[in-house]
Amino acid sequence: MKTRKRQLPISTLCSWRDRIEEQPHFQRLPAWTRAQKQLLIDSIIRKYEIPKMYWRMLPPGQLARYKVIDGQQRLHAIWEFKNGDLALSHDLAPVSGISISGMKYRDLPLDLASDFDSYGVDVVIVEEAIQTDLEDEVREMFLRLQNGTALNAQEKRNAMSGAMRDFVKVLGQHPVFLNCAFGPGRFVFDHIAAQTTLIELCGGPTDIRDDDVNLMYERHRRFDVKGAKATKVRRTYDFLSKAFPAKTPELTRHSTITLYGLASLLIDRYVVDDLTEALQQWFIAFEAGRRADEALPEDRRDLQLVEYRRLIHGAADAGENIRARIGIVQERFLAAHPKIEALDATRRFDCEQRLDIYRRDQGVCQLRLKCEGARVPWENWHADHILPYSKGGRTTHCNGQVACSACNLAKGANVLGLAAHWRLANDCDSMPSGEPRKGVTSANASS
Ligand SMILES: [Zn+2]
């Protein structure tokens, strides 16, 4: 966000009244009391500092040039005093020996009136406000100003150093965010990127309040951005990005975090390659169902949806809350897709299986991608999932084969050979389900 700081005399603030548009949209705070207004005017007359105002520059062609983000109450007090609609309070100490108690602007001695007119108010003008996308960023800024904190927590974190900061900054630019409901305020994307990374680091739902995220930045200054956790985070974002390839207004901040949790869990436990479209359709229907349910009379509502609504409206960054939300979407998604294929609970072949595989294949590399069927020593061979684990391949001796390390590495980029299909389909009597496996005919191998 590009900003420009200007110091404007009060006379200008008053003559620009027509150029300044108010923001009823953001301004839902109670109006100032007379005493608050009097205190501000008194502070100006005594030349005390008053807080900065924030205005947003409007696109050309409109009557007004600026919209107030923060400072509306102060502006009103100044305008009221200048117009003679506000008098100073009656119990004020004199200024330079002159009593100003109960005075209106026109009663002020000339010197004080002219000092008042020339008092400089700091105004931060937010430029580049022509895109409507900026609305969110401006709103966020307004909220922060109202809370009295100059920098938000994510901005402070962005000022920290370390690998975690760098990782989150890159993740915050993931294309998935462009299709979410919320705007491009960088710190919003970074914030969610950080929160979801923390969920992944903890292996599931956890508290993702600012303190928790700060701690993650500190503890993971040397975060391995190429390690398993980082890879999993990126894979989950890629999956979500595939599931939501177009703008999806249902993807609010909370639902993005909830869906991250669901997607991460699906990736860990199920064959997800063909699930992206299913997830998108299910989620949009789920949100439509929630809206429809909210219109129902109290006694006919779906209690689980009532609970879900309660969860996203209170303490939404608490671990228990996130766990409950993910639990609800998981339950509903799996109920809607009962045939999703689960991954094998075990990924590693045990000693007995390895020996079976090695003897059956006579210690010869079956992959033959980089070799011509090399004989590999017992001390140095890879037990490879014929149908890759991530595609639902079981950790059974019939889905295992001997691979040399060169071939095993190369497998990722190659398509499963036809012979392997046959062996899977015909030779194995311990297939977990009678149905043909998903992915067998088109599996890109990468176990
Ligand atoms: Zn080989």
Image (tube, grey):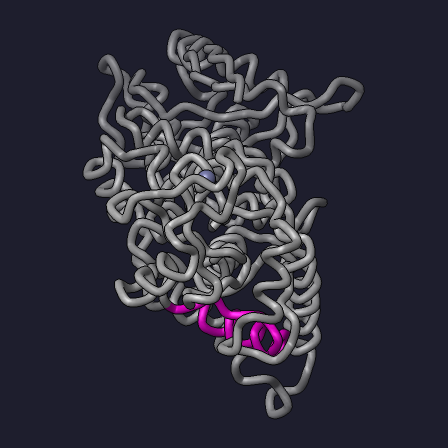
Decide whether residue 328 is among the magenta residues. yes
Does the image show residue 414? yes
In which image quadrant can residue 280 be found? Answer: bottom right
Residue name at image x 57 percent, y 65 percent = 424
Is residue 3 part of the magenta span, yes or no?
no
Residue 111 is situated, as x and y percent measured from the top left of the image, at 39, 7
Looking at the image, residue 314 sits to the left or right of residue 263; the answer is left
- The number of numbered badges drawn on the structure is 0
Report whether 121 appears left or right of 219.
right
Q: Residue, x 52% and y 78% (percent of image)?
A: 429
Horizontal placement of 141 versus 56: left or right? left
Q: Nearer the viewer, residue 133 or 344?
A: 344
Looking at the picture, does residue 14 appear above or below residue 101?
A: above
Name the outermost residue toward the left: 219
Residue numbers of the magenta segment: 326-345
Residue 56, above or below 359: above
The residue that appears at 64% across and 72% down in the rendered structure is 290
Residue 314 at x, y percent in the picture: 41, 65
Residue 441, given in percent of the width and then of the height, sits at 68, 57
Q: Nearer the viewer, residue 223 or 417?
A: 417
The structure residue drawn at horizontal position 41% and vertical position 65%, both measured from the top left corner, is 395
